[in-house]
Image (cartoon, rainbow, N blue to C red):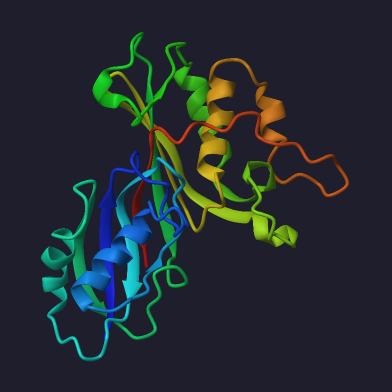
């Protein structure tokens, strides 16, 4: 049996999704809970990494339970949630095809990023929004976000982990890049076939600088699809993890 989990978490207390020696990651805590339920170690595969402090409404993971466990897929939900901290919750568990893999079967992901433009950051938004008391020009912000649409080389918007080898490693297709007005600020929404390390945060940082008049639109546009013969520019600002959430993963 191959099982698919849908997981939500408040990322503020944790060191990201990916397992780390500290043990304080969402994957570590989920695998610890799973081992308590299964009475043996069980490895899970996530759809992708989220950084320290980043939250998720619809992270996806897959795992193969031990053969001797015949528990109904739905029963994994309460069994795991009783072992997890309140900031992590399994929302759904369902049986999927043997070929399903949370990471390699993913077709698209959607992220959102919240900006708070209020003069004083409300305490309940601390860690959940980027506080920008200097107002943004919404028209320019919309224009900047539209630049990301389509297929581009996003090398300027990737914080390399050191394992990228070819230019095609940076090519991504963005099908949604927009913002909506929320109470006290904006919510930026991005959907694409894949996102690299800190890519969304670098995209947000550059778009915000354009909207604040700190980065010229033509310089911003030149960051995409840079020719190999030209010096490699980088997004001028990586937005903080505050405000970033993984909304959903499409398969």
Q: Position of residue 104 (x, y in %)?
A: 47, 72
Q: Is residue 250 above or below residue 202?
A: below
Figure quadrant of residue 173: bottom right
Q: Residue at x 11, y 72 (%)?
A: 75
For the C terminus, the image quarter is bottom left
Q: Residue at x 43, y 72 (%)?
A: 105
Q: Is residue 7 above or below residue 99?
A: above
Q: Position of residue 148 (x, y in %)?
A: 56, 41
For the N terminus, the image quarter is bottom left
Which residue occupies the extreme right position in the image?
229
Which residue occupies the extreme top position in the image?
119
Figure quadrant of residue 12: top left
Q: Residue at x 33, y 62 (%)?
A: 60
Q: Position of residue 213 (x, y in %)?
A: 60, 15
Q: Is residue 150 left or right of residue 139?
A: right
Q: Residue at x 25, y 90 (%)?
A: 67
Figure quadrant of residue 63: bottom left
Q: Position of residue 203 (x, y in %)?
A: 55, 37
Q: Is residue 163 left or right of residue 210?
A: right
Numbered marks: total: 0
Q: Nearer the viewer, residue 37 or 63?
A: 37
């Amino acid at each position: 049996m191959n099982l698919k989990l849908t997981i939500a978490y408040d990322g503020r207390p944790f060191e990201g999704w990916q397992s780390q020696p500290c043990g304080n990651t969402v994957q570590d805590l989920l695998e610890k809970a799973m081992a308590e339920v299964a009475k043996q170690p069980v490895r899970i595969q996530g759809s992708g990494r989220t950084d320290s402090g980043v939250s998720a409404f619809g992270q996806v993971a897959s795992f193969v339970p031990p053969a001797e466990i015949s528990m109904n897929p739905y029963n994994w939900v309460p069994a795991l949630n009783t072992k997890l901290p309140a900031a992590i919750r399994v929302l759904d568990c369902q049986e999927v095809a043997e070929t399903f893999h949370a990471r390699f079967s993913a077709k698209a992901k959607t992220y959102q990023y919240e900006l708070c433009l209020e003069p004083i950051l409300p305490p309940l938004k601390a860690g959940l929004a980027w506080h920008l008391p200097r107002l943004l020009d919404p028209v320019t912000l919309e224009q900047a976000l539209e630049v990301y649409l389509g297929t581009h080389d996003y090398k300027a918007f990737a914080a390399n982990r050191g394992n990228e080898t070819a230019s095609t490693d940076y090519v991504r297709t963005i099908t949604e890049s927009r913002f909506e007005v929320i109470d006290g600020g904006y919510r930026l929404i991005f959907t694409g076939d894949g996102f690299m390390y800190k890519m969304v945060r670098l995209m947000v940082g550059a778009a915000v600088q354009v909207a604040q008049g700190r980065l010229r639109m033509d310089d911003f546009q030149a960051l995409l699809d840079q020719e190999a013969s030209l010096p490699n520019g980088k997004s001028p600002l990586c937005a903080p993890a505050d405000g970033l959430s993984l909304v959903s993963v499409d398969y």
